[in-house]
Amino acid sequence: RSARLDGIGTTIFAEMSALAVETGAINLGQGFPDQDGPEVVKEAARAAITDGPNQYVAGIGIPLLREAIARHQQRFHGIELDPGREVVVTTGATEAVAAALLGLVNPRDDVLVLEPFYDSYRAMIQMVGARHRAVTLRAPDFRLPVDELRAAVTPRTTAIVLNSPHNPTGAVLTREELTAVAEVAIEHDLVVISDEVYEHLSFATPHVPIATVPGMAERTLTISSAGKTFSFTGWKVGWATGPADLVDALMGAKQFLTYTSGTPFQPAVAAALDLPDAFYVALRDDLRHKRDLLCAGLADLGLDVFVPEGTYFATTDVAPLGFDDGLEFCRELPRRAGVVAIPHQVFHDDRPDGSNPGRTLVRWAFCKRETVLDEAVTRLARLR
Ligand code: PMP
Ligand code: GLN
């Protein structure tokens, strides 16, 4: 193993999903829905496999999909894009983040991230040879501490990886918070890599892409994917949009990572993006309802629940149940109660004194059928 991987262990999602399979536990860990997305979208993929294209296409993605992504950004966010130069299709949001970091960040740069962070960010920043600087969102409300964001900037800072709606806390950054991020980015001439995969899962207020904040369009790459919005997490179709120079930099890296991304899924995702507004509303309403169901169940068990404003993850503090370590809790939970969850602490840096702001916090995915959520809560009652 190269030094690039020093300290990078197995991702928590692999560990916990393997544990779910091994124990037969209900998997409220890794975020994937237990029902596939729309049949018409599957049909479009089947048709593409039957009729083609099935060979390599342009690395930047097929025009049909790039045009559909541009239409989506205009319909939901009022963002105007040239699909020829300002949109790139990637192998999931994960590749978009990786290629953006490789294409835009130099070794020894500092990159700001919101902590707790989606685990690929820290690993990728390290693989790029840069250093991440965490700005911590703290329980109970996980607001952005703007002063700490300002204080985290160093002379070497060149980029911010933003994520809203935020995994794992479920926080949705407000326009005020985004404006504060924008001020910092503009003042220090930073690029923003904005991971918005949960853009359609903001339950109270509409999601605001930071690219729509004045002065930000020219310095932001906006990233999303078909996984969460259309419930096809295994298709791994994502995209990035933004100014041509940033898209070019991302593409400069992407061309040698994967060159191009799963051809027949591209027309299918184009069809999905053009689904009527009613689809998107139903997705959000369904998940809001499931959020309420799971949060009520977890609260009844005596857990402190932090009800998320977005994403499909709820967070609890397991300390009231007598547990002082969320990772140990999650490792024992499948055998004790037949449920899998994800500890927040792995999305934080351990502090020099050994403390961790996410020590007793645990994340539960609610993108599951109601019967499954009910059964999970019934099983968790065994913990009492
Ligand atoms: N970013 C965040 C914040 C996520 O939660 C996930 C998981 N969907 C990803 C990126 C990865 O997305 P994809 O599967 O499209 O690579
Ligand atoms: N994004 C999903 C989650 O946070 C899945 C992540 C993964 O498997 N890498 O659970």
Image (spheres, rainbow, N blue to C red):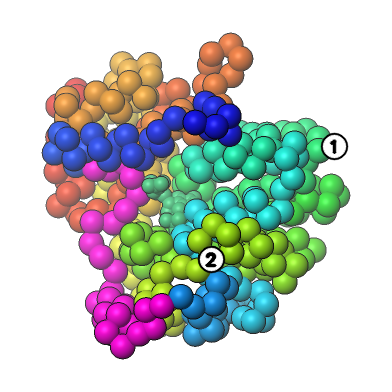
Q: Position of residue 145 (x, y in %)?
A: 67, 37
Quadrant into which the C terminus falls? top left
Residue in view at x 30 percent, y 80 percent: 49
Between marks 2 and 1, how big is the CA–CA gap? 34 Å
- The disc labelled 2 sits on which kind of residue? Tyr
Q: Nearer the viewer, mark 2 or mark 1?
A: 2
Q: Is residue 115 among the parts visible in the rendering?
A: no
Report the residue marked by disc 1. Answer: 155
* Number of numbered callouts drawn: 2
**Residue 253 visible in rendering:** yes
Q: Nearer the viewer, residue 33 or 59?
A: 59
Bounds of the magenta span? 27-55
Magenta-span inclusion, residue 48: yes
Percent x, y of residue 338: 16, 33
Residue for badge 2: 259
Q: Position of residue 345 (x, y in %)?
A: 46, 28
Helix, strand or loop at mark 1: loop
Mark 1 belongs to which amino acid? Answer: Pro
